[in-house]
Every structure is written in structure tokens, then in C-alpha cells.
Image (cartoon, grey):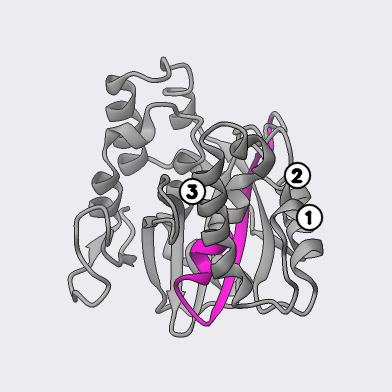
Amino acid sequence: MRSRWRFAPLPTAVGITEDDPMHFDFEEAARGLGPSAFTSPYRSTVPLLSFMKSGDRLISLLEKLQLGPDSALHLEYTVAPPRGKGKVSCTDLMVIDGARSVAIEAKWTEPRYETVSEWLAGGTQENRQEVLEGWLDLIRQFTTAPVPPDDLADLQYQTLHRAASACSTSNQPSVAYVVFVAADTGQKPESSPSVDLELLRNRVGADTALGLALVTVEMEPTAAFAEIRDLAKGRSETGVAVMDALLEKDLFEFSQPTSKRF
């Protein structure tokens, strides 16, 4: 049965602002991402959207993050660097509930991405330092600590700009990593996001208004997932098949989410 949950528009993906009253339902939101978002059945987008098909499950997640059931949901929410020239930060799901916002990043089989120091070394130093300072300007609005760039050298760069994205959207920002763990195999991210959440908390300080959380969801792949699990990664036809399976079938059985704050 298709979820009746309503989604806010994809503001930057289709050029619609948050003030536009139009909303997408689950199917429209998933199809709005397109097959390119599903070219591997093991992308974290797959269990995230499968989890979100149920309004009750979604509300349970929002409650864990202290968000209301009428929150606006923005898939693939993009924020451009406020300084320098660089790629946008594209959050899996930005949830905005009045003055509160939570940048939700899903993880399943992905590795830990490059650190701030590794990212800095991969391009023009002057510009990348400028981009980094722009992200930090957003975060510093919510902390009394100076947060010098050198203190964040070992932080995953993704965690930094996801936090900055949340800080750009509301007066009470948070970042939450949602980790999916396959109960049958124990399959999960190679490195727990808790490492980076703990590091960011230590650097910005305990008195910051920036919230940090880790949500864990155990799941059991269904027979429907078994039908797509061996599809070749990176192919357009795989994207179509995975998206259709996601819309038409239940790919996982989920446990209740558990959460930890940092």
C-alpha cells in the first residue's frame, strides 16, 4: 500500500521555493529523484526511502529527533558554499519544523569519506580554504568556541558541510546520521558516523546550539530485495528496476529506531 505521507517540494532540484504550497506524495518524491539515485540496490537512499514509505515509521523517527508530524520534508536538500567556489552540500533529507531543522544523512554500506585535511589537499588551497571558512561561518553562529579549521583536520568533510547546511536553515539546527544495519548479515557502514559526531562535538563544544545525533535502525531484507540485490551497479536499467521495486514492494522489515545524542 502506497504511503499517504506528503512531502515538501525539492526546492533546488526543480526550482520550487519552500513558500510554494505544492507538495509531492511519496511516489512523486521518489520518482523526482530519478533512476540515477538508485543505480545500486545498496545505496543508503534505498533503505531510507523504504523506511519512509510508512507514515508511522517516519513519525517514530521524527519523534526520536524531537520533530513534529507536520514537519516539512525536503529530499536531496542542497546548500551552496557561502564563500569560495565549490560543490553544493546535498543532504539526503532536510526536515524543517518551524524554527528547528535536522539534516538527516543515511548510511548503510558506504565507507567513511575524505577528511577535511584530505579534501583541502585535493584542490586549489586558497579557494578551498575560503570554502571551508564559509561553512565554518555558518556553524560559528551557534557556538561560543572559535572552531579554527586546523581543529577539524581529521573530521569527515561531509559531516562538516552537512552541519553547516543545517545551520543555514533554522535557529535550532541539528545533524542526524541514520545508520541502517542489515540484521541477517550485520552489514553496516565501514566506519560508524559516531566517530565524526563525537569529534565535531568535542571541537564545537558542549554548550553549542548545534544538535548532533546518531539513529540506528536494524532491518531484515525481504524476498523482494533478494530479487534486486545482485543487479549490476552503475547501470541505468538497475536504477529503473530498483526504483520500481522500491515503489511497488516492501524491500525491508524494520525495527524501531534507537538514538544517541552527542
Check residue 183 for magenta coloring.
Answer: yes
Is any part of residue 220 visible from this angle?
Answer: yes
Circle nearer the N terminus (1, 3): 3
Query: Left or right: where does residue 142 sit relative to residue 153?
Result: left
Determine whether the residue tagged by mark 1 lies in a helix, strand or loop: helix
Looking at the image, is mark 2 or mark 1 nearer the viewer?
2
Q: Which mark is residue 154?
A: 2
Q: Residue at x 40, y 54 (%)?
A: 53
Circle nearer the N terminus (2, 1): 2
Residue found at the far front of this picture:
126
Q: Which mark is residue 48?
A: 3
Q: Are marks 2 and 1 in contact (CB under 8 Å)?
A: yes
What type is the residue that disc 3 sits on?
Leu
Query: Left or right: where does residue 150 sit relative to residue 39?
Result: right
Give how far across and how far down residue 134 sits, in percent: 52, 61
Residue 85, above or below 139: above
Q: Residue at x 47, y 16 (%)?
A: 230
Give how far across and how far down residue 39 sits, in percent: 37, 27
Q: Residue at x 36, y 36 (%)?
A: 37
Check residue 12 for magenta coloring.
Answer: no
Q: Which residue is mark 1?
A: 199
The magenta stretch is: 163-184
Estimate the spatial distance between the alpha carbons at disc 2 and disc 3, rounded to whole Å: 27 Å
Circle nearer the N terminus (2, 3): 3
Looking at the image, is mark 1 or mark 3 nearer the viewer?
1
Q: Are marks 1 and 3 in contact (CB under 8 Å)?
A: no
Estimate the spatial distance between the alpha carbons at disc 2 and disc 1, rounded to whole Å: 8 Å
Residue closest to the eye, 49 or 53:
49
Q: Which mark is residue 259?
A: none
What type is the residue that disc 2 sits on?
Asp
